[in-house]
């Protein structure tokens, strides 16, 4: 079996093919906007694709790509539009080829034949779809003028083929450099026998070894690449292997915490404590490294969107610019692919229903070109992905009318914008004024919410009718090892993720406001009301001694002042307080999934196992936050 037929090679080949297609799309979009710009990046990508197809056993595609490369090199700025359109078709077919290979299907090459015919339609452009050979030529040891003989041979070959590369380079041959062996890489429409005859007729040629490019790459290119490369080697690691490392690391973290507790109870020596501290630092360093290994730049999925937005805008007769910033920021490998669908839905909505037509925009004194900004940034320990367009904004009156017509809200009072936002994502309420093939049914937004919920994220909306719409996806950087705050609720241990805990408050009982009708609790923080969840009451936990939530009390004058511990949690612009009995400190834990019954409650996001096998449930603050909004 050839190397390019192995499963491992196919996987690497598909990965590189996907990356090159994304690069090509990005370069073509830039060239389309500015026809006078240099096309060096596109040419470099085409050259890489050409080599990839040769190495992978697709000589026809390698030749086609070479022809695309030549066409881009020879065309002037006036013909760029036609060339870009052809290269976009080429790009689509390369993507179709990748999809076929990924699905285990035999690739269909009929469309490539059509592209070849279109290439031939360009004036004065010769389509070169011949054979590609690598030829190793050995001259006689008695030859004193090898450079001259080589130049004569290359001149003859150029009449029948395109010389793509020589070793030594042509400049060194012309300068009279001494060498014993000549390597020639060429593309020709002649057969192997015709080329061999030209070489054999050249004086002082002792032998010639001709092969497909695959052989020449392995014998000539690899040593020089290894010798000249200054970049560190990279190894692809499977996500399952990283998950297993995380699991083992979690066991080490638990063991370390158990050892520390024993040491504190039995007052071990100073040496023991120093070694334990060193052990914990090492575990922490490994933890940071593994989490870093799991991070993948968002750029890996964002590069496909400019082309999608461009095509969608053209289909709708709109002019739209997509501006992406912060694409270098990384997220967990297990999360990044799940973000593709939500971002696709939101960008399609922005183009289809957010951005107005050029004529409508000009009537509103806007630039005829709409702008969608996709901004990625850090916020505490979260990643925030914001999709913001300068289009028509949300029509809150029409959306509220739709909510009431569907019977989702019986309240006669005007819904707040925050309540409307909750309905938009939770009940398949479309923000569109009309339904199209692309969007308008509200299903996409419901899918967006489901996916973001699954990865422990949150969604925020902000909009001003006629001006803009902004949708923010707030997601955790890593879902591997998580730092939690351990809590005691009436002798029951629970945990809450530390990532979004803003502060711990000790609040006198009279500062907690309680609604007499609903029994809901509120505190005032920085002059703003914050809902408070009494976990003792909500989870129906009862102590044998007391059912009170109070933890502390102090004497003030002649009266006892009851105080409460409140964990203030914030996600984006929204806050929530959790009333607890006791705070038990921070821990690094590995979150494990919980059974269907507990997960359906929505109260808990997972569980962790402590030393001794004790299972501790981890609260899902987002569920409480959404419940408080919809109440």
Image: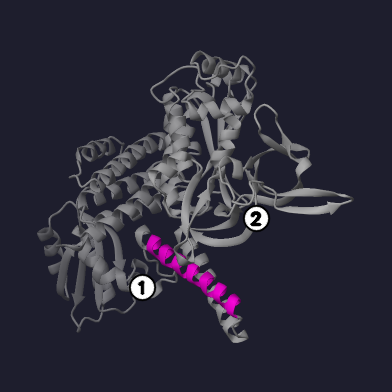
- Give the main secondary structure of the magenta stretch: helix
Query: What percent of the width, then of the height, locates residue 525?
Result: 75, 42
> Which residue is located at x 21 percent, y 70 percent?
136
Which residue matches tag 2? Answer: 582
Q: How are the colours assigned in the image?
A: one colour
Residues in magenta?
Answer: 242-266
Is residue 80 something that shows in the picture? yes
Reading the chain from its start, which is encountered first: label 2 or label 1? 1
Is the C terminus in the top left, top right, bottom left or bottom right quadrant?
top right
> Which residue is located at x 62 percent, y 21 percent?
415
Q: Is residue 260 magenta?
A: yes
Q: Is residue 172 magenta?
A: no
Does residue 395 sit above or below 518 in this rendering?
Answer: above
**Looking at this view, is 50 or 412 the one in front?**
412
Query: What percent of the width, then of the height, locates residue 488?
Result: 60, 54
Which residue matches tag 1? Answer: 226
**Looking at this view, is 78 or 410 the one in front?**
410
Q: How far is mark 2 from mark 1, CA to CA?
A: 60 Å
Check whether the beta carbons of the residues at disc 2 and disc 1 lie within 8 A of each other: no
**Looking at this view, is 57 or 617 the one in front?**
617
Element type at mark 1: helix
Q: Which residue is farthest right? A: 557
Query: What percent of the width, then of the height, locates residue 341?
Result: 42, 38
> Which residue is located at x 73 percent, y 54 percent?
552
């Amino acid at each position: 079996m050839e190397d390019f037929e192995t499963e491992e090679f196919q996987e690497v080949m598909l990965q590189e093919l996907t990356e090159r297609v994304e690069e090509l799309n990005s370069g073509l979009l830039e060239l389309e906007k500015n026809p006078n710009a240099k096309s060096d990046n596109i040419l470099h990508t085409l050259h890489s694709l050409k080599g990839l197809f040769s190495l992978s056993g697709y000589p026809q595609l390698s030749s086609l790509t070479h022809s695309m490369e030549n066409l881009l090199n020879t065309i002037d700025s006036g013909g760029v539009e036609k060339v870009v359109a052809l290269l976009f078709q080429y790009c689509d077919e390369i993507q179709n080829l990748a999809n076929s290979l990924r699905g285990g299907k035999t690739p269909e090459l009929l469309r490539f034949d059509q592209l070849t015919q279109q290439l031939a339609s360009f004036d004065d452009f010769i389509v070169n779809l011949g054979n590609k050979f690598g030829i190793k030529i050995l001259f006689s040891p008695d030859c004193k003028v090898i450079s001259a003989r080589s130049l004569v041979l290359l001149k003859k070959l150029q009449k029948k083929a395109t010389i793509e590369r020589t070793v030594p380079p042509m400049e060194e041959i012309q300068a009279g450099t001494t060498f014993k062996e000549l390597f020639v890489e060429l593309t020709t429409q002649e057969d192997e026998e015709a080329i061999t005859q030209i070489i054999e007729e050249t004086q002082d040629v002792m032998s010639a070894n001709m092969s497909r490019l695959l052989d020449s790459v392995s014998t000539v290119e690899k040593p020089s690449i290894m010798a000249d490369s200054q970049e560190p080697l990279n190894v692809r690691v499977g996500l399952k292997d990283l998950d297993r490392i995380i699991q083992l690391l979690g066991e080490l973290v638990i063991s370390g915490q158990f050892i520390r507790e024993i040491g504190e109870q039995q007052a071990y020596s100073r040496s023991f404590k120093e070694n334990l501290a060193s052990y914990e630092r090492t575990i922490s360093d490994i933890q940071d490294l593994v989490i870093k290994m799991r991070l993948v730049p968002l750029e890996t999925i964002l590069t496909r969107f400019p082309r999608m937005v461009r095509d969608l805008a053209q289909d709708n007769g709109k002019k739209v610019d997509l501006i992406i910033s912060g694409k270098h920021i990384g997220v967990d490998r297990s999360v990044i692919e799940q973000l593709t669908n939500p971002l696709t839905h939101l960008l399609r909505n922005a183009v289809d229903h957010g951005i107005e037509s050029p004529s409508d925009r000009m009537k509103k004194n806007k630039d005829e070109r709409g702008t969608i900004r996709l901004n990625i940034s850090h916020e505490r320990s979260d990643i925030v992905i914001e999709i913001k367009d300068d289009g028509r904004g949300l029509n809150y009156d029409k959306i509220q009318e739709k909510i009431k017509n569907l019977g989702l809200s019986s309240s006669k009072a005007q819904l707040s914008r925050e309540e409307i936002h909750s309905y938009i994502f939770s009940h398949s309420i479309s923000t569109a004024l009309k339904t199209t093939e692309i969007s308008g049914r509200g299903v996409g937004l419901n899918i967006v919410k489901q996916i973001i919920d699954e990865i422990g994220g949150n969604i925020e909306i902000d909009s001003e009718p006629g001006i803009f719409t902004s949708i923010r996806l707030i997601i955790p950087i890593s879902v591997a090892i998580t730092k939690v705050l351990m809590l005691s609720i009436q002798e029951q241990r629970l945990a809450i993720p530390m990532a979004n805990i803003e502060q711990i408050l000790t609040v006198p009982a009279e500062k907690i406001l309680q609604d007499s009708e609903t029994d809901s609790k509120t505190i005032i923080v920085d002059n703003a009301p914050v809902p408070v969840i009494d976990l003792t009451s909500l989870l129906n936990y009862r102590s044998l001694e007391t059912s009170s939530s109070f933890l502390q009390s102090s004497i003030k004058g002649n009266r006892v002042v009851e105080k409460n511990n409140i964990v203030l949690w914030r996600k984006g612009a929204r806050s929530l307080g959790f009333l607890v009995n006791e705070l038990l400190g921070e821990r690094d834990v590995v979150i494990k999934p919980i059974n269907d019954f507990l997960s359906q409650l929505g109260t808990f996001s997972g569980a962790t196992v402590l030393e001794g096998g004790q299972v501790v449930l981890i609260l899902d603050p987002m569920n409480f936050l959404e419940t408080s909004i919809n109440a």
